[in-house]
Image: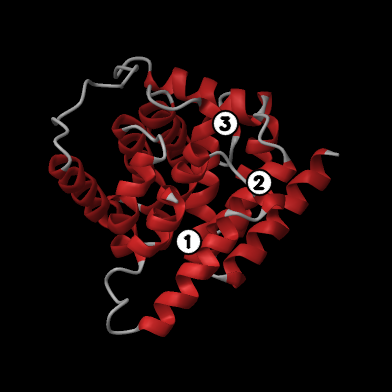
């Protein structure tokens, strides 16, 4: 019943003016959520939906889905981490509306802000700890990558280690495997990021998020991003799995 209420909530903005569309969308979302072959735990699905809506810039759907995601067991701190980490993958220009939307919904629900800090790095160790996260996810080939890559890529490679992985992946609130999962969702939802989707599908596989799990993630997010991006994401999962076979 909670899942069905959540589906109707997404359509609440247009169910009176566009009842046919609301019925189709609501029915299909319920179908997807209850498809036995691609089930996810409610909390895991909530994390994926939040990340997917950040990736595709679905701000209205994000706001509508937040109550259901919270009711499904995703904590406010976990949601905040999904929004924060998106800054690396969509940029602050596109993430800022989601920061504001989350704060507004949490305030409406009586959640006191700000939360306790989740950062674990300081200026002197963010590069080292971020690089270790890269190594943990992608393997030893990432060790000191900014020192071995072409010189014109050294700066952005160093920023990837220190900022993307050091400032965000080392934070509390989510496990490393969960962070890779939500990153996969950001990228798949954006479209045009297939090399990165493939790379992070590989990172997910290395972290224990296997092919069947990633397929379920894509299927559960399909109503939010459509068939083309979903089929592309499945192809990226296949490619990553083949490379690790």
Find residue 169 and report its horizontal and vertical position in percent: 44, 29
> Which residue in the structure is indicated by mark 3?
145
Q: State the residue position of label 2.
A: 214
Q: Earlier in the sequence, mark 1 or mark 3?
A: 3
Nearest the camera: 211 or 156? 211
Choose mark 2 or mark 3, whichever is in front.
Answer: 2
Q: Residue at x 33, y 43 (%)?
A: 83
Looking at the image, do the residues carrying marks 1 and 3 touch, with CB atoms under 8 Å apart?
no
Q: Quadrant of the C terminus?
A: top right
Element under label 3? Answer: helix
Residue visible at 42% across and 49% down in the picture:
2
Dot 1 lies on which element?
Answer: helix
User: How far apart, in angstroms, are the residues tagged by discs 1 and 2?
Assistant: 17 Å
Q: Is residue 8 left or right of residue 24?
A: left
Q: Nearer the viewer, mark 1 or mark 2?
A: 2
How far apart in space, not on screen, are marks 1 and 3 (Cα)? 26 Å
Label drawn at residue 190: 1
- Extreme front residue here? 1
Q: What's the mark number on residue 23?
A: none
């Amino acid at each position: 019943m909670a899942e069905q209420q959540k589906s109707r909530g997404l359509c609440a903005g247009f169910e009176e003016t566009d009842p046919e569309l609301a019925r189709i969308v609501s029915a299909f979302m319920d179908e997807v959520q209850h498809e036995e072959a691609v089930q996810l735990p409610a909390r895991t699905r909530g994390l994926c939906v939040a990340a997917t809506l950040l990736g595709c810039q679905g701000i209205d759907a994000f706001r509508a889905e937040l109550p259901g995601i919270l009711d499904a067991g995703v904590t406010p701190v976990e949601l905040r981490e999904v929004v924060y980490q998106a800054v690396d993958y969509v940029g602050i220009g596109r993430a800022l509306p989601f920061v504001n939307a989350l704060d507004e919904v949490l305030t409406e629900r009586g959640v006191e802000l700000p939360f306790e800090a989740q950062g674990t790095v300081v200026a002197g160790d963010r590069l080292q700890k971020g690089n270790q996260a890269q190594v943990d996810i992608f393997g030893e080939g990432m060790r000191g990558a900014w020192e071995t890559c072409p010189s014109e890529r050294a700066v952005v490679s160093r920023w990837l280690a220190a900022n993307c992985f050091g400032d965000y992946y080392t934070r509390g609130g989510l496990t490393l495997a969960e962070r890779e999962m939500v990153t996969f969702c950001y990228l798949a939802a954006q479209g045009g990021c297939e090399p990165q989707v493939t790379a992070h599908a590989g990172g997910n596989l290395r972290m224990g998020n296997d092919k069947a799990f990633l397929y379920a993630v894509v299927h559960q997010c399909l109503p939010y991003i459509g068939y083309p991006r979903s089929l592309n994401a499945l192809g990226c999962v296949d490619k990553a799995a083949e490379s690790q076979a």
